[in-house]
Amino acid sequence: MPDFTPTAQQQLKFLKNIQLILQSGSFSSTYKFALLISLSRLAIEKGEDLGESLSFEYTEIAEKFIELYWKQAVPYTFHEEGQLILNQNNGKQAAIVNRIVTLRQSYSSLGLLRRDSLVWLKLLKEVTRTVKDMPVRYLQNINGQNFEFLYQLDQCAKQLILLPQVMFCLRQFSEIIEELCQKRWIDYIRKNSSNAEILNKLPNLEQFMFEPSRNQLNAVANVLVELQECRCFYCNKEMKKNNYAVDHFIPWSMYPSDTGHNFVLADSSCNSKKSNLLASQEFLHKWKARNEQHDLIIVDRISALGFLTDKDRSHRVSEWAYRQAKENNYLIWNIL
């Protein structure tokens, strides 16, 4: 069986091509950034470290778009009476954002929206159509020329098929791609004249656009306090009130997408020492066992706070993360 694993030179060429798209491509909205991030995350969740091709349903890509833009559809309050949804398009607001803004008036969290199957499926269908017609069609277009290095465009297909070697590269360079796309996305928002009114009053645009809110994490902490009987996930010592923090077991710096099963509660000392490192294998086993044992509670209570809860997805991400750590000699944190 032939080995399609890309050589070091081919991997470097892939990164150069990503850079070329971000620097030289035409951007009339933020959809292309969202598409690159979505493909990268899906490659982690559904792929393997092989040089073979990988297929995605367009609805799977649409789900990632909804996750990303649910956060973007939150209004920024820039003074006591003024609010503004950051414009994600050169002209009128992006259609996906407008649709989610409307739904946010009826659903306080994405988890609750997903439970309303009829509304969710309608939204998924609308976003799928937009994704297929716009960013998928134009992402690889540079100066009017179609530069196909991620996938071959087939508007009639029901799936998007990544070219050989692309799945491997997306998984290998996910953190780089995510960071590049987020920075370009933020630059796009800052340069959009529709947003100029408030952006000089928004001190940390990256935090507002991409990170979970502190109120949400505080609510997660209340659930985990009960689940862990007020003991630190790592050192197992009893924690004092308000002397703990919600920790991303798979660090946010590696995979900046929240699922409810990824959260653990750690005392301030352990949380600070672990920082953005992966924990040792003993904690990986403990975390997986916790998720198996309390899956129903996590799904029921944390999804109600607005986080997606998918145990299998979280565990697939962890397998990717620990493989990355082994192959690249990442530092592993151990409490000892």
Image (cartoon, rainbow, N blue to C red):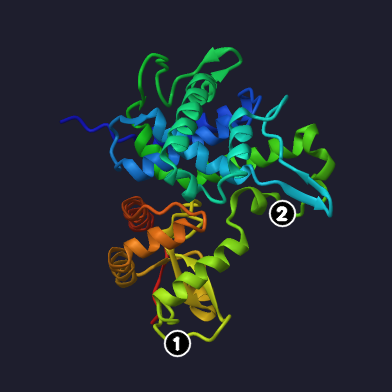
Q: Give x and y (percent) for residue 251.
A: 47, 60
Q: Which residue is mark 1?
A: 238
Q: Give x and y (percent) for residue 24.
A: 62, 25
Q: Which residue is mark 2?
A: 204
In which quadrant of the rendered view does residue 102 lie? top right
Q: Give x and y (percent) for residue 6.
A: 33, 34
Q: Nearer the viewer, residue 153 or 278?
A: 153
For marks 2 and 1, give the CA distance. Answer: 34 Å
Q: Say if 4 sits above or below 240 in the image.
A: above
Residue at disc 2, secondary structure: loop
In which quadrant of the rendered view does residue 48 lie? top left
Q: Are marks 2 and 1 in contact (CB under 8 Å)?
A: no
Residue at the (53%, 86%) spot, across then down: 240
Give the residue furthest to the left: 1
Q: Say if 140 sits above or below 190 in the image.
A: above
Res. 255 in view: yes
Q: Nearer the viewer, residue 30 or 131?
A: 131
Res. 12 in view: no
Residue at disc 1, secondary structure: loop
Mark 2 or 1, closer to the camera? 1
At label 1, counting other C-alpha atoms closer than 10 Å, the crowd grade (few under 14, some 14-19, many 20 or more) is few
Total number of numbered labels?
A: 2
Give the position of the C terminus as an image quadrant.
bottom left
